[in-house]
Amino acid sequence: MSNLVSIIIPTYNEEKNIRECLNSVLEFNYPLNSLEIFVVDGMSEDKTREIVLNEFCALHPNIRLLDNPKRTAPFAFNIGIKESNGDYIVIIGAHSSYSKDYIKNLISWHKKLDAANIGGVMQTEVRNKNKTTSAIIKVLSNKFGVGNANFRTGSKKVVAVDTVAYGCYKKECFDKFGLFNEKLTRNQDIEFNKRLIKGGEKIYLVPNATCTYYARETFSGIAKNNFQNGMWNILTVFYTKDFKSLSLRHFVPLFFVLALLLPLILALFYWQFVFVSALALVLYLLLIISVSIKLNDKSTSFLNLVFTFFTLHISYGTGSLIGILKLPLLAIKKE
């Protein structure tokens, strides 16, 4: 008999994505009567709820729509966990679709590995292919773009990691380590996974469980998303009071922005510091030019690649800097 698996899907205004996501879940080659699926919705203002209720809940009794009045992801995760009866809990995103053997392979690996959480490889894709979006795919799948996030860059073998996307957790993890930190609008999964590792548990990435993540398709979309990611890196440290709740790669863009900005501030007193900032920029540009030359092909353009790397890193690092500047105000509010 197959283990009962609880699947949690947080949503907010996902009318463009939720059909494909749920259809891919229903196509899993895992017994449907061993799946319970919770769509935890942050009171969407588009047709998300209507689609879920009329097209899925009405036809599939194992799909339920739950309300998340607080709207953000950690509340959705925790609402779903409290409703779950499964031996394993899988938290997935509505922005993605999943391979047919996604659940089957994750459960299979849980029976072979001593792991608290196991996740698969995220393949970045877009719905509208052009030279700009092709550049975005390449950058978000490249180590120079996203660091050593193996779930994004891929792996040909099973590897121990510090976090995974759309992971499959043993339910007892939440009994032992608590729920997701509801103060963290972002990074709540990374912080929880760090808690697992700190408690002596293991997390693995496996290559034969894959999903397709549909990325934002404009430079402005990439910039807004990564600004928030960068800012929440700093806020995560603030709320958890623990630098180890994240990894060094999460702060590299901040170091780059500071390498550009601090010498310019010092140049107000000693103008020669301008050259330090200029040197940092030149070295960075040489790096992204070199990587972009290697990645360039007929599907995209060299300039699109360079600009995507620059947009990603600058927006992420600037977000972290703004996060630092917010800390005094947050500290006052906390008091």
Image (cartoon, rainbow, N blue to C red):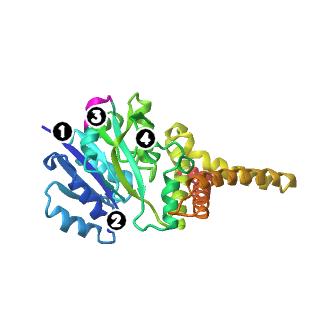
Instruction: Give the magenta range.
Output: 108-114
Amino acid type, label 2: Glu
User: Which of labels 2 and 4 is toward the front?
Assistant: 4
SS for tag 3? Answer: helix
Residue at image point 54% right, 59% down: 297
CA gap, disc 1 to disc 3?
11 Å
> Which residue is tagged 2?
14
User: Which of labels 3 and 4 is toward the front?
Assistant: 4
The answer to if 153 sits in the magenta stretch is no
Residue 101 as seen in the image, left or right of residue 132:
left
> Which residue is tagged 4?
155
The answer to whether the residues at label 3 and label 4 have Cβ atoms under 8 Å apart is: no
Task: Pick whichever of labels 1 and 3 is earlier in the sequence.
Answer: 1
| Residue farthest toward the bottom in the current orientation of the protein | 46
> Which residue is tagged 3?
110
Q: Quadrant of residue 47?
A: bottom left
Amino acid type, label 3: His
Q: Position of residue 268 (x, y in %)?
A: 83, 57
Task: Pick whichever of labels 2 and 1 is earlier in the sequence.
Answer: 1
| SS majority, magenta | helix
Q: Position of residue 49 (x, y in %)?
A: 26, 67
Task: Pick whichever of labels 3 and 2 is earlier in the sequence.
Answer: 2
Q: Position of residue 198 (x, y in %)?
A: 44, 31
SS for tag 4? Answer: loop
Mark 4: few/some/many CA within 10 Å (<14, 14-19, 20+): some
The answer to whether the residues at label 1 and label 3 have Cβ atoms under 8 Å apart is: no
